[in-house]
Amino acid sequence: MISIPHKAKQFLVLLIKLLIVGGAFYFIYNQLAHNDKLDWQKFITLFRKNQSVLGIGFILLLSVLNRYFEILKWQNLAKVIHEISLGEATKQVLAALTAGIFTPNGVGEYAGKALFYPKSEAKKVVFLNLICNGIQMVLTVIFGLFGLLYFNAKYEVITTQTVAILFGCFVLLFIVLFSVKKIKIKGYSIEKLLHKINEIPKPIHRKNIVLGILRYLVFSHQYYVLFLAFDVDLPYFTLIATIAVVYFLASSLPTFQFLDFAVKGSVAIYFFGILGVNEWIVVFISTLMWFLNVVLPVVIGAYYVLNFKTKAVE
């Protein structure tokens, strides 16, 4: 094995840190500066008309709560390895978010968290992060399906027959997955995965689910509050159902964190367009959600990345 001199290792780590942070900020700037669908003049006019310190404070509070519940989820799951403080959980979550912003579906986030633990624990960290993100995805699918059924009952985007076929496909897929759970792919199987999940104490699972639900309710209602701020007057359940559908369908598409608002925005334009909401309002709200819940945490995460100590991975 080639031995890398200490000075060279320090320089390499610094270079990687700068590349991660520089890449994150470049992608953020590029998306905000070169998105021709963002009509800043309309936004400024509406902002001046409806500006409220209390309203802005409440929207920012929801962003803090959104990330706070995610941090609590990770702190809860990290107990399986060892107890970590809230401050340490915050550092790991935000640094990992920064590392994963320009990787497909935030894959870099898994590696980012693993760097805070000994190499011997890397697989366990990746698995726990999968559980952390997995429950959020499951909740997005559940709420999204209910939202889709509600939305479709009112606006019939797809026929009842198509809904029945899709539901049948989901049930069939579920049955097939569990009927072949012993089949191994590269040494892994669904049965082995379920066994590993069951090894985690049930109180940790229950807390993970509760925190996941709270996080879902926070960011979906932040979306809802922003629509109210942009003078969109629609019934509560119609708006919430549509938001659930947008998150469900957008989360099903492979994407990068830095393109998250573009993917959600394009899906949102279609569904909110059916409700008669102006396209520019949908684009702006999707961009604001991305800015508040991804960009701001990444800015803080950049600090943790730059101050990351190499001894944590040695």
Image (cartoon, rainbow, N blue to C red):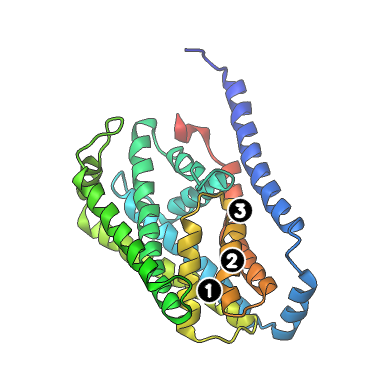
For image coordinates 64% across by 32% down, the residue present is: 15
Residue count near mark 3 (Cα–Cα under 10 Å), binned few <14, some 14–19, many ≥20: some
Residue shown at 31%/45% (left/top)? 82
Question: Measuring 34% from the left and 31% from the top, which residue is drawn there?
Answer: 120
Quadrant of the image for the C terminus?
top left
Q: Pick the residue in front: 277 or 82.
A: 277
Residue on which disc 2 sits: 289
Label number found at residue 222: 1
Mark 1 and mark 2 lie on one chain; the one further toward the N terminus is: 1
> What is the spatial separation of the Cα atoms under label 1 and label 2, in whole angstroms?
8 Å
Specify few, some or many for label 1: CA neighbours under 10 Å numbering under 14, 14-19, or 20 or more: many
> What's the amino acid at mark 1?
Gln
Q: Secondary structure at mark 2?
A: helix
Q: Residue at x 42, y 72 (%)?
A: 159
Which label was assigned to residue 157?
A: none
Secondary structure under badge 3? helix
Dot 1 and dot 2 residues touching (CB under 8 Å) = yes
Specify the quadrant of the image occupied by residue 116: top left
Q: Amino acid at mark 2?
A: Met
* Spatial CA span between label 1 and label 3: 20 Å
